[in-house]
Amino acid sequence: MSERLRQTFRTDHRVAFPVSGTGSSGMEAMVANLVAPGDRVLCGVHGLFGQRMADELGRRGAEVVRVEGEWGRAIPTEQLLDAAKEPFDALFVVHAETSTGVAQPLDGLADACRAHDALLLVDCVTSLGGHRLEIDAWGIDAAFSGTQKCLNVPPGLAPFTVGPRAAAKAESVDCPSWYFDLSLVLGYWSGTGGRAYHHTAPINLIYGLHEGLEDVLEEGVEARWARHATAHAALLRAVRALGLERIAPEGEHLNPLLAVRIPEGIDDAAVRGALLTEDGIEISGGVGKFAGQAWRIGVMGFGANPAPQRRLIEALAPRLGHDPAEAISELEAGWAVAPA
Ligand SMILES: *Cc1c(COP(=O)(O)O)cnc(C)c1O
């Protein structure tokens, strides 16, 4: 399990295991073990999940410095580096903002963190296995993910990895959570200490994740990123033929999630409701600042394939007053393009 996770995370970190609980439990584990009360933590906020982390860090008693970006855009790297000029203990960013469909570039952040002996902490719930993510090459000290996004596995586990700098920090932090205490959990996971019982691992989910990671490695991590990129580009061509526009600009977009503006005069709830009840297809509405303004279409895991996308377009087109033919031919043309 750990080796499969390392390959998917692209890391040599010794610590790579799934925390018991959904993606959010990975966030709890990260903050409880790697942030101490009073730590100065820079927190990128450009969507719902950045907001959530700022909330979580505040609950932990950290001094939270919010680095606010526009919703639907990446936070300019300059802005993060600017905030990193004063001493700090950790920088947290959401790599894949599922609330807006934006991928946050992480280049240069690790150097800024090391200059202050601070940790680079990342939420990669919607990028692991779906969008280029290089834990080691980008110098990420700790990251958490989820299983039900790009890994195509039932929800309930949070893949988690911690590098040596973060592990050293964890030793100095008094973890307030018994359940998420890394040293206790690792005593169970790693076999050290005779695999001491800590909690009952949800083995049904662990089997599921094991299998899901096998699928990732069989396909190849990079090939999987490429498939998600092709699926995103093809679906974008198709929805443009239906008069929809993506919110994120090219280059800042997150392949596993296509967020589009709801056109004037279209009833958000009616369209999504009909897709769900009549066609058995779920697309998500906007959240936070985008409530009522955006549709968020998953392009993850099995969904990042021609057949489910075709079903979506065929069901969506008439509800937007379009004949699906042109959009379907755009979809097909998009899939015919060799990945960049
Ligand atoms: C889904 C998601 C989470 C939370 O994961 P759960 O499995 O719902 O607890 C956290 N961060 C991001 C970016 C997500 O997309």
Image: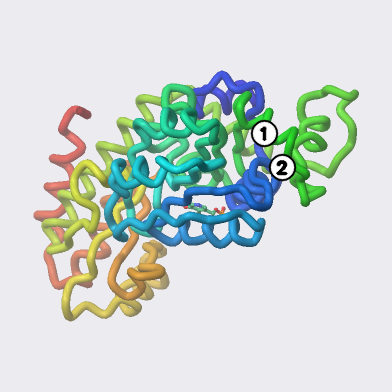
Query: Looking at the image, which residue is at 17% across and 62% down?
Result: 244
> Label 2 belongs to which residue?
204
In this picture, residue 164 sits left or right of residue 74:
right
Q: Amino acid at mark 1?
A: Lys
Q: Which of the 4 image quadrants contains residue 232?
A: top left
User: Where residue 162 sits in the image (x, y, percent)?
Assistant: 62, 31
> Label 1 belongs to which residue?
169
Secondary structure beneath disc 1?
Answer: helix
First of labels 2, 1 by sequence position: 1
Which mark, by number, is residue 280? none
Q: Amino acid at mark 2?
A: Asn
In this picture, residue 180 sits left or right of residue 230:
right
Q: Which of the 4 image quadrants contains residue 250?
A: top left
Query: Looking at the image, which residue is at 23% across and 59% down?
Result: 314
The residue carrying pointer 1 sits among few (fewer than 14), some (14 to 19) or many (20 or more) residues within 10 Å by Cα, namely: some
Which is closer to the viewer, label 2 or label 1? 1
User: Where residue 266 sits in the image (x, y, percent)?
Assistant: 21, 77
Q: Most extreme residue toward the top, as rendered?
A: 12
The residue carrying pointer 2 sits among few (fewer than 14), some (14 to 19) or many (20 or more) residues within 10 Å by Cα, namely: few
Please indicate, yes or no, whether residue 156 appears anywhere in the rendered image: no
Given residues 263 and 46, the one toward you in this image is 46
Q: Which of the 4 image quadrants contains residue 291?
A: bottom left
Is residue 121 shown above or below 249?
A: above
Give the colouring mode of the picture.
Answer: rainbow
Asked whether the beta carbons under mark 2 and mark 1 sit within 8 Å of each other, the answer is no
Gap in angstroms between the C-alphas marked 2 and 1: 32 Å
In this picture, residue 182 sits left or right of residue 310:
right
Given residues 90 and 276, the one toward you in this image is 90
Instruction: Count all numbered tags in the image, as a single digit.
Output: 2
